[in-house]
Amino acid sequence: SELAEEQRASSLRALMEDTGGDGGGGGDAMATMEMERHPSFGPLPCNDIVDAPDDDSMCVDWTDQSYDPSSTLVTIECGTCVRMDASTSGALDLPHGLNVVGKLLIDADSLGPEYSVDVRAPFVLVQGVLDVRSSRTVSPADEAVRFSLTGDLDVDLASMIHAHNS
């Protein structure tokens, strides 16, 4: 959606202004960066139904899926929204990686103040939507959501989704 894209661009502009233009408190290298995106990159049309703002009714719980992370890559398919649920609290080991082509929703606020998850994987590919929500202050003592990248596995991504744009 054009509104969502404009909101993202506006947030990036605000970040650049707050940090002196380079995201790190000085210089202006990023201040002149154009806010245009590559014409073949953008929201996947197959996710339109699951990426409506403030409507998570299309999401299904993680535990209702038949993922077997110990033996295979976990892929959230395009057009599917998967919501982390209370059973994912703690360490969530995904030794073969995570590929988000659809939408992954981690709403720590809705799961309560004790909820926290550490997603541990050699890689996390986000081709779709990764929606992480938490109003808690991030600190080493209180992390609602953490992604820990493990190992040194090289991964090549060949996205077939945008092949029709070629």
Image: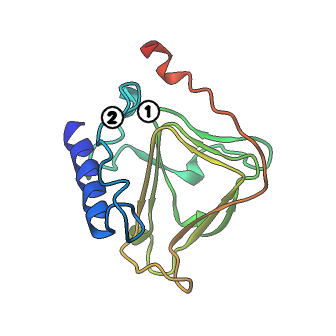
Which residue does the numbered mark 2 point to in the structure image?
49
Q: Is residue 82 found left or right of 74 in the rendered image?
A: left
Residue at (42, 47) in percent of width and height: 59
The quadrant where residue 134 appears: bottom left
Q: Secondary structure at mark 2?
A: loop
Contact, mark 1 vs mark 2 (Cβ under 8 Å) = yes
Which residue does the numbered mark 1 point to in the structure image?
79
Numbered circle sitting on residue 65? none
The quadrant where residue 105 appears: bottom left
Q: Position of residue 158 (x, y in %)?
A: 62, 26
Residue at (33, 59) in percent of width and height: 28
Q: Residues within 10 Å of mark 2 (few under 14, many from 20)?
A: few
Residue at (38, 30) in percent of width and height: 38
Image position of 76 with respect to 15: above or below: above
Residue flagged by tag 2: what amino acid is it? Ile
Q: Position of residue 121 (x, y in %)?
A: 69, 55
